[in-house]
Amino acid sequence: MANTSTRTLRLLSLLQTHKYWPGTELAERLDVSPRTLRRDIDRLRDLGYPVEAQRGVDGGYQLAAGAALPPLMVDDDEAVALVVGLQVAMQGMVEGVAESSVRALAKVVQVMPPRLRRRVEAIRAMTVPADWGGRSDPGPDPAVLTTVALACRDSERLRFTYIAADSRRSERHAEPHRLVALGRRWYLVAFDLTRHDWRSFRIDRLTGPAGDGSRFRPRELPIADAAEFVRAGVDRIARPYRIEVMVEAPADAVQERIGRWASVEAVGPGRCRVSMTTDSLDWPTMALGSLEAEFRVLEPPELIAQIRAWGERFGRAQAGPADHCADRES
């Protein structure tokens, strides 16, 4: 039989994996008597876990929603941030963890009090996942994200301040439709009541969202999929760099490695052309380096200069720890 601490942790894990456990089955899984199981349940309650018991022949136990998230004791914004992270992992952006993220999300939501669960369910229900990548950006403010998600779910008109790409600030009044996650960026798809047209808004450029208390009948989006609507808008934005590179590697191997962010065209049995547009040269530099293959930059010249600068910097980093120590001591 496992010691008390180990058994208590296992009991907690079992209670979090199923909504309800018959007492006899739970005791068998832990290899303890019903009396010992009751003592372990009481121990969990003393630690702050709201375990409910159903008496009788078919009696059992379940972990109920509580006033907090014991023992994590996270606040509202931290709980939302946790769910957002699991949502991203569920999209398969981190290989091998999507299924685990689904199980973890189910455990977290199961013990959330209704106040937090309402906010979490709004994000889950009103977000359209999309398989598309981009450069790394700061994540959205959880408070902004949940306010927008609730407005989407409840069909409540929303007012907010928006900062455009050229830094112009404007006040918007909109009918929110869906949240869309593209790579690490989040977008709100909404009908802009000021411009009288559909728009997509980057959440990280949106501040002070607040529902105005008025409800609306949802309009029909001109494109069937909200994620496709955002993609189309992003593709129309002019980007400063067009990348063309010849890579000495099979097209299928390159496609598997960076195909989500670039166009790969075979030009021979062991050679391919890689094309992409980007607003930063950092990502193409890292992507090409990750291919572990010879390549030749066709355009732009700025990328050639950046790769050379990175190469010189990496070359200077070849000195070992002993060399650095000697420099400091001299």
Image (spheres, grey):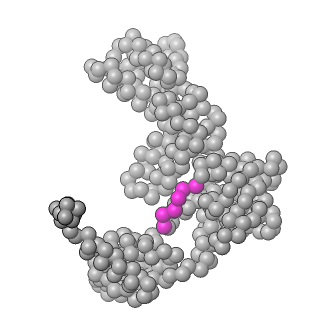
Q: Is residue 71 above or below residue 320?
A: above
Predominant SS along the magenta part: loop
How far across and how far down the image is residue 21, in percent?
46, 25
**Which stretch is magenta?**
135-140
| Residue at 67%, 59% in the rendered image | 206
Image quarter in which the C terminus is found: bottom left
How far across and how far down the image is residue 252, in percent?
35, 75
- Please say whether residue 139 is one of the residues in the magenta stretch: yes
Q: Is residue 218 left or right of residue 124?
A: right
Q: Hey, which quadrant is residue 129 in on the image?
A: bottom right
| Residue at 70%, 63% in the rendered image | 162
- Please say whether residue 107 is one of the residues in the magenta stretch: no
Q: How many numbered circles does the render carry?
A: 0
Q: Hey, which quadrant is residue 189 in on the image?
A: bottom right
**Can residue 118 be seen in the rendering of this structure?**
yes
Looking at the image, which is closer to me, 57 or 153?
A: 153
Q: Is residue 330 left or right of residue 72?
A: left
How far across and how far down the image is residue 287, in percent?
38, 72
How far across and how far down the image is residue 111, in percent?
54, 32
Q: Is residue 325 above or below residue 305?
A: above
Q: Is residue 4 above or below residue 247?
A: above
| Residue at 34%, 81% in the rendered image | 308
